[in-house]
Amino acid sequence: NEGHKGDSSLFFGLSGTGKTTLSADPKRMLIGDDEHCWSDDGVFNIEGGCYAKCVNLTAESEPDIYNAIRFGSVLENVMYDAKDRAVDYANIGITENTRCSYPIDFIPNAKPLCIGPHPKNIVFLTCDAFGVLPPVAKLTPAQAMYYFISGYTAKVAGTEVGVKEPQATFSACFGEAFLMYHPTRYAEMLAEKLRRHEADAWLVSTGWTGGSYGVGKRMSLSYTRAIIDAIHSGELRNAPTTQLPIFNLSVPSKCSNVPDTVLVPSKAWASQAEYTATLTKLGTMFASNFSKYKDRASADI
């Protein structure tokens, strides 16, 4: 999406991480929901529409998406009243993966032609089911390459067939099945663009806080939106940070409209021993996954 000052942001993430929800920002122009290209002239969308999750959708929580569901859109897997055709978005009798497709111009602030300038912010979205990654961390270009290659998230119940609870998964460059070249090549291309256009890279977790899945709870959408707002305003660029052990991430310790206990994951856990053990477990999984690409990775990565 793009701000009114001409600053665009590019979101990366697998299914269920919040791409559609967070890119549809009432304060910014929507360039596209998925399928984008970043050329020497800027970014552009090649899809022309959106594919939104509908589970528990309300006009209050996601007004732009809710209002885009009208004649011309297509609903999938939803339950509705046969008499008045009112949709029950809380009903997951068929599947939790209820969806809606609609043309991009059904969003009021969609940008004509779906073309934007070079991004000023790159956001890697992840749904951390372990509840140990921070809701936001600022990445160096080298870290951006590492997390781009890792492509970590969780398969979320309702989004993946047969998944009843979140499971950790890694997909290189957030789309391993579609890569033509080795992931490190794409990572180097991304880092070069970050440097050339002086863009900031961020890791944003929309997953669990206060514990792993089954103990903690899903990150509040209002907190995530506040974090994205703070990224766009420049607030987090100079915010005080603390270091996350093992991952060596720079984690902002202050953000408007987000509690400090949420920003620093360990503060939300009842048991620090369990938090450290879980953080170590996830770190080991990252290292194991990255071993597949280590032989062709640069020293920076």
Image: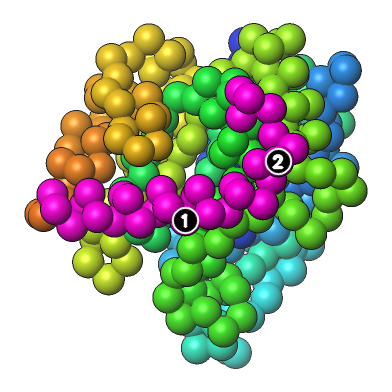
Pointer 2: what residue?
295
Residue 227 visible in the displayed image: no
Q: Which residues are magenta?
A: 272-301
Quarter of the figure with the N terminus:
top right
Residue appearing at x 27%, y 71% in the figure: 214
Depicted 198 relative to depicted 257: above or below: above
What amino acid is labelled 2 in the image?
Answer: Asp
Q: How is the image coloured?
A: rainbow
Residue appearing at x 27%, y 23% in the figure: 242
Q: CA distance from mark 1 to mark 2?
A: 18 Å
Pick the front one: 180 or 297 = 297
Of labels 1 and 2, earlier in sequence is: 1
Pick the front one: 68 or 268 = 268
Residue 175 visible in the displayed image: yes
Residue appearing at x 50%, y 48% in the figure: 287
Count of marks overlaid on the render: 2
What amino acid is labelled 1 in the image?
Answer: Met
Label the magenta part by its dominant secondary structure.
Answer: helix
* Residue 85 screen position, x and y as percent: 60, 80
Pointer 1: what residue?
285
Depicted 149 relative to depicted 243: above or below: below
Q: Residue furthest front?
A: 295
